[in-house]
Image (tube, rainbow, N blue to C red):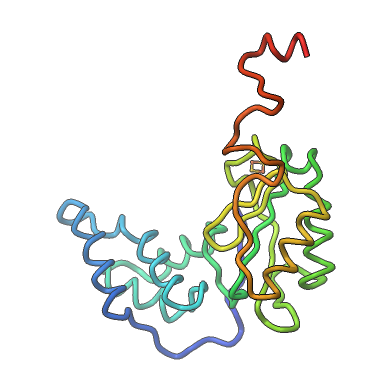
Amino acid sequence: MSLKKPAKDQPENFEFSSSSLEEAKTIIAKYPEGKQQSAVMALLYIAQRQNDNWIPLAAMKYIAKFLDMPYIKVYEVATFYSMYNLSPVGKYFIQVCTTTPCMIRGANKLVEACKEKISENESELSKDKTCSWMEVECLGACVNAPMMQINDNYYEDLDKEKTLKILESLFKGETPKPGSYRGRINNEPENNRKTLLDLKNA
Ligand code: FES
């Protein structure tokens, strides 16, 4: 988790679109009367999706009013969790996991690929403004390490060369296939192993 700084350039106003409003109301209705503030995380996520994948301060203020809670409490939540972007990100937002299991499987090579293809520093837009990248903590796919997330999809079992190819196809406007890049289905064992005994005899 990271404490992030809000963007310098901020829009003056924010309000939910009609579809976001509908979605927010549906979520709030799931909570008991008087507990609507518990929907704050979901509402921040809706605001992020609506606003090109980042949350302006005006959206936090809007949500605070919407849920009848102090603005500072919404701000605290938005700045605490790494899934909320507080400044503009690319149309393709790449999150590289660099927690221990991914790191010992070569996550630093994925970071190198992002630096070469996108931008030297994380959270900076590429020259054509389509991509940005950042390091994040464990994304829960350690068994397929190293891995990265691009928008809503996971790309797993990567190395530098495969990462470069994926990034190149993004720049061409293509959508690379998500999942394992070593041909595994989900996180199945390799070499057709079925039990730990197979491993012992391998
Ligand atoms: S350590 Fe990278 S997904 Fe868990």
Residue 118 at x, y percent in the picture:
76, 72
- Identify the image quadrant of the C terminus: top right
Residue 14 at x, y percent in the picture:
39, 84
Write the residue at 63% across / 70% down: 174
Please tell me in which quadrant of the rendered image residue 189 appears: top right
**Residue at the bottom extreme, as displayed:** 12
68 left or right, relative to 90: left
39 left or right, relative to 30: right
Write the residue at 76% across / 57% down: 163
46 left or right, relative to 89: left
Write the residue at 39% across / 59% down: 41
Residue 44 at x, y percent in the picture:
41, 66
Please tell me in which quadrant of the rendered image residue 191 appears: top right
Q: Is 90 rendered above or below residue 34?
A: below
116 left or right, relative to 93: right
Residue 71 at x, y percent in the picture:
39, 71
